Image (cartoon, rainbow, N blue to C red):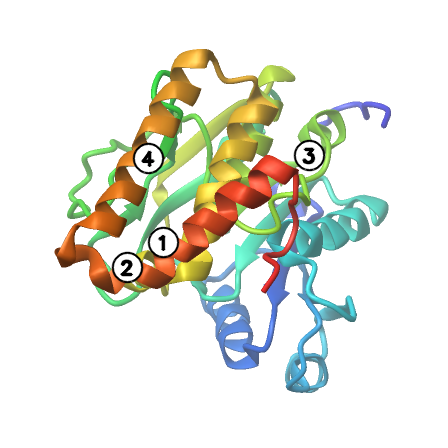
């Protein structure tokens, strides 16, 4: 792609597209759209990308939210593939910014304006994200940006499970990556860094994209005063064999694509070996049989170069 010239019109007139990915959860998607309306967000184009729902989601959302553009994929392309459909649509329409927004996220008052204000202050900012707290415990942080430990080959959410007490200050701050749950992308950053890598299908794709964007010369920024809430249960995710499969496999793909060093690979391999041994030999981890099988499958698929959706 060619780079486009950067201009800086007033924030209130910026063309922005908001992409919400839906898969058999119309109630969540409609609630997310309602939170945008209640937040007092400026003019924007709402695009719902339906990822092959089988429950009539697309028609229901279009009926109840006629001002939204609904794009039907026909099959589940995952987080990366589904959002890429939306990104291509948005950039083709001339959007200068695109907000990727999870259907189970809820937007706080003024969030979009705060993200845009931060992005407009510096045209080297490629992605911006808010402080995201848990929907069930609204004063507990889920993420205030993401960090990468290149020595251990690990990523984590900054501020995870901390009480939100203003510890991140008020000024926008640079981070390693932004959660794809709520992620504002600059057009020029997408053009230079490329699309989300669809080999991930789900998980790690936003972290890998942010690494590419940073290496292309863009900054990744967390805006502490912008707020959103996420309906997520870390315990449920930890117990899910499917989530464990993708997190295991995609961490290896992340290390490969980002060119991580030998130390990161050795540490990751040792960590995986310890986990498998513990789950196989210790009676206290017998309830982890399904996760162990998912982990073995993930390692086998990574070794064979099998990416994309998990094969059942």
Local SS, label 1: helix
Q: Which of marks 4 and 2 is nearer the N terminus?
A: 4
Mark 3 and mark 4 lie on one chain; the one further toward the N terminus is: 3
Left or right of 86 in this view: 312: left
Image mark for residue 292: 1
Could you give the CA–CA distance between mark 3 and mark 4, rounded to whole angstroms?
A: 53 Å
| Residue 116 visible somewhere in the drawing | no
Residue at horizontal 58%, vertical 51%? 100
Give the numbered dot on residue 9. Answer: 3
Q: How crowded is mark 1: few (under 14 residues within 10 Å), some or many (20 or more)?
A: many
Please state which of residues 172 and 257 is positioned toward the viewer in this rendering.
Answer: 257
Residues at discs 1 and 2 in contact (Cβ within 8 Å): yes
Q: Decide if residue 252 is on the left or right side of residue 131.
A: right
Give the image quarter of residue 107. bottom left
Label 1 to label 2: alpha-carbon separation: 6 Å
Q: Residue at x 85, y 28 (%)?
A: 1
Residue on which disc 4 sits? 273
| Contact check, label 3 and label 4, Cβ < 8 Å | no
**Front-most of residues 85 and 166:** 85
Give me the disc on residue 258: none
Label 3: element kind: loop
Residue 102 image position (x, y, % from top left): 52, 59
Callout 2 crowding tier (Cα within 10 Å): few <14, some 14–19, many ≥20: some
Report the side of 281 relative to 188 (left or right). left
Give the CA separation, mark 1 to mark 4: 11 Å
């Amino acid at each position: 792609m060619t780079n486009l010239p950067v201009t800086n019109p007033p924030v209130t007139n910026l063309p922005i597209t908001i992409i919400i990915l839906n898969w058999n959860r119309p109630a969540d998607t409609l609630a997310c759209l309602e939170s945008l309306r209640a937040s007092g967000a400026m003019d924007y184009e709402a695009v719902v990308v339906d990822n092959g729902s089988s429950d009539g989601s697309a028609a229901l959302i279009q009926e109840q939210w006629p001002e939204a553009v609904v794009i039907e994929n026909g099959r589940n392309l995952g987080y990366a593939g589904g959002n890429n459909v939306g990104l291509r649509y948005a950039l083709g329409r001339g959007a200068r910014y695109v907000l990727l927004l999870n259907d189970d996220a809820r937007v706080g008052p003024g969030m979009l304006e705060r993200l845009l204000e931060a992005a407009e202050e510096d045209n080297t900012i490629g992605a911006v994200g808010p402080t995201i707290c848990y929907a069930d415990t609204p004063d507990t942080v889920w993420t205030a940006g993401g960090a990468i430990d290149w020595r251990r080959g690990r990523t984590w959410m900054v501020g995870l499970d901390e009480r939100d007490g203003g510890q991140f200050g008020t000024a926008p701050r640079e981070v390693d990556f932004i959660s794809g749950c709520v992620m504002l992308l600059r057009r020029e950053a997408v053009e230079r860094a490329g699309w989300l890598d669809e080999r991930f299908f789900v998980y790690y794709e936003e972290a890998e994209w942010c690494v590419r964007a940073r290496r292309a010369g863009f900054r990744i920024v967390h805006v502490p005063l912008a707020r959103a809430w996420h309906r997520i249960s870390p315990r449920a995710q930890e117990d899910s064999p499917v989530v464990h499969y993708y997190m295991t496999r995609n961490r290896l793909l992340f290390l490969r694509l980002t060119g991580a060093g030998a130390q990161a690979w050795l540490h990751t391999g040792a960590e995986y070996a310890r986990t498998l041994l513990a789950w196989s030999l210790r009676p206290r981890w017998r309830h982890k049989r399904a996760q162990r099988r998912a982990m073995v499958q993930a390692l086998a698929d990574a070794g064979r170069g099998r990416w994309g959706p998990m094969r059942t």
